[in-house]
Amino acid sequence: MSGVIAVLPKIEDARQISGILKRRGIDVAALCTTAAMALNKAHELECGVVICSYRVSDMHYTQLARYLPQYFDLLLLVSEAEAHNAPPGMMLLTYPVRPGSLAGTVEMMLVQLERRLKKSRAKPPKRTQKEQNYINNAKMVLMERNHMTEEEAFRYIQKSSMDSGTNMVETAQMILMLFYDS
């Protein structure tokens, strides 16, 4: 679940930001006056945008950005004079903040975050060392017994895996069982 968290020193300002976003159909998950409150809320959500002013009472905005969970981005609200101090690549809006710019920027950031999250879920999980060892041992067996190169052995395991509808680790285990049973 994604959400927006507004972190501003004055709760009235956070409510104003929330009102602007709600009128555009963007749900605001939390209104906070400290970065610690925002971090607690961020760890409850899957992804989102933290809207932060330049000054927050308990930590600098760069610290907040560093402590945010992986699928959270920070939108910094700053004065024109302070904008040049922001780190390169940080998303920011300068005061006075226009409602359309705020809502459009937040919408764009949420879409990008959700795409990144979806893309990361599509990646197959990393193999454990034990699983990788099964594959390596099966390759060694194929290389020794069938005089294959390492690449040929890998491709054989990969193709056998696809043909049989099992994953590569299971296929490697079957190859090893056949070798050690004979």
Image (spheres, grey):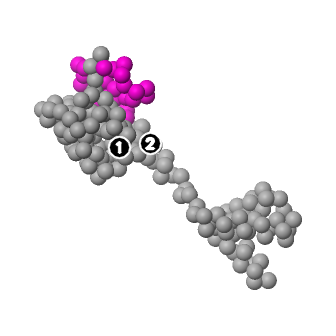
Type of amino acid under label 1: Leu
Circle 2 Cα neighbour tier, 10 Å, few/some/many (<14 / 14–19 / ≥20): few
Q: Judge by depth and name the residue closer to the eye, 166 or 139.
A: 139
In the depicted structure, whether residue 142 falls above or below residue 123 = below
Whether residue 164 is visible here, answered yes or no, is: no
In the depicted structure, whether residue 66 falls above or below residue 164 = above
The residue identified by callout 2 is: 115
The residue identified by callout 1 is: 68
Real-space CA distance between mark 1 and mark 2, rounded to the nearest whole angstrom: 18 Å
Image quarter where the C terminus lies is bottom right
- Mark 1 or mark 2: name the one nearer the start of the chain: 1
Q: Secondary structure at mark 1?
A: loop
Residue at image position (69%, 75%) is 174
* Chain part drawn in magenta: 82-110
Examine the image and state in which quarter residue 97 appears: top left
Which one is closest to the eye, mark 1 or mark 2? 1
Q: Judge by depth and name the residue closer to the eye, 64 or 28.
A: 64
Q: x, y percentage for residue 150?
A: 79, 59
Q: x, y percentage for residue 175?
A: 73, 73
Residue 81 on the magenta segment: no
